[in-house]
Image: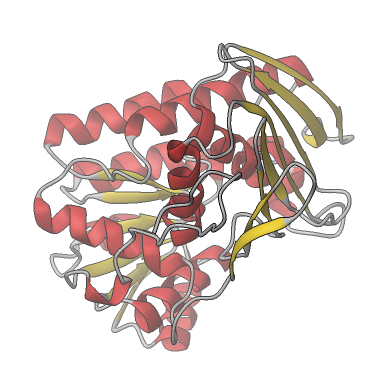
Amino acid sequence: MSPVAVGGNAHALPEARVPDPREAPPIRWGILAPGGIANEFAAAVTAGTASTVVAVGSRSEQRARDFADRHHIPRAFGSYEALVADEAVDAVYVASPHSEHHDHALLALEAGKPVLVEKAFTRNVTEARAVIRAGADRGLLVAEAMWARYLPHYDVVRQVLDTGVLGDLVLLRADHSQLLHPNGPERLARPELAGGALLDLGVYPVSFADHLLGPPASVAARGSLTECGVDATVGIVLAYVSGAVAVLTCSMLARTPCAAEIIGTEARLELDGPFYAPTAVRLLSPAGEVLAERPGTLPGPLRGFSYQAAEFARCLSAGSRECPAMPHAATLRVMSTMDEIRAQVGVRYPGE
């Protein structure tokens, strides 16, 4: 059901068009780099899809074995080369630090394996283009694992905007900040690993704005850096040809509600925090009256990461080269925007 005009007597949010991930064709995953986010992915594939994780690769054979034992994965390799060469692996999930995404994605593609690459897709748009081009040259599926873009509530928000019920879009606000520095993951403090708040946290609001508003006409950013030279806190203003403005923030120095809001001349949408996870979506009148609400729940044993794994499996089975929920053009726009943000804030990674 689509929402009717705000001035009408009834309102409803549309049903998500995202298929049940448990109904996607089964494929066999190999996980490259068994870090924290790889744990989430492995658990989601097992609990929420028909696919399986059949192999894991690490630079440390013991670390790979520990991960394999934890997730009941039959094969563990002490090198990435051995993982991508495994004939039992249909696709590779790249979960290494941002600085390594380019090389590890190319390693898998050169071995003939389609890749789902964790966000941020690469360090910069030049590397992103190289990975996407390598996939195209080999006729292989390449996609960014920006898991939020595959979730049902993102599709609901997209549909609401398409109906025009919000009127002319005026403002989008989104924030993603977590207390991750100085006592969080070491990689976030290291420029050589493409650390900082933007690529780890800020990519969520930047990608959210891209999903709803497309490419910005202008980018303005300010921020503070750590003593190691990576971004700690960033404020971003994106302006669009339509007149809409997106105000985005991220920080690794404090925890915030991580909520989002899309405001139009006739109504607005609110997404509870964290907005990038399966969360509640509300349609409100200009006066703040709640007109419709969709709860933030997933059915049964599903986990959020299962949706990206399932779409990848569907696209792979269909012979597609990109995923509709996160097409290559969107990945390149997001990376280009983040390059400009980093340039204005004053962050450059070694080797760029």
> At 19% from the left edge and 41% from the top edge, which residue is drawn?
321
- Above or below: residue 179 compared with residue 29: above
Q: How many marks?
A: 0
Residue 119, placed above or below residue 64 = above
- Whether residue 142 appears in this view of the structure is yes
In this picture, residue 230 sits left or right of residue 81: right
Residue 350, quarter of the rendered image: top right
Where residue 137 appears, as percent x and y from the top left, is 15, 29
In the image, is residue 209 above or below residue 340? below
Q: Residue at x 58, y 31 (%)?
A: 167
Between 204 and 238, the residue placed more toward the observer is 238
| Furthest-front residue in this view | 9
Q: How is the image coloured?
A: secondary structure
Instruction: Check the picture and name the quadrant holding the N terminus.
Output: bottom left
- Residue 29, percent from left and from top: 27, 67
For residue 352, above or below residue 197: above
Quarter occupied by residue 71: bottom left
Do we see residue 352 in this rendering? no
Left or right position of 223 against 305: right
Q: Residue at x 70, y 44 (%)?
A: 261
| Nearer to us in this view, 223 or 159 | 159
Residue 153: x and y in percent read 50, 58
Q: Position of residue 250 (x, y in %)?
A: 76, 41
Quadrant location of the C terminus in the rendered image: top right
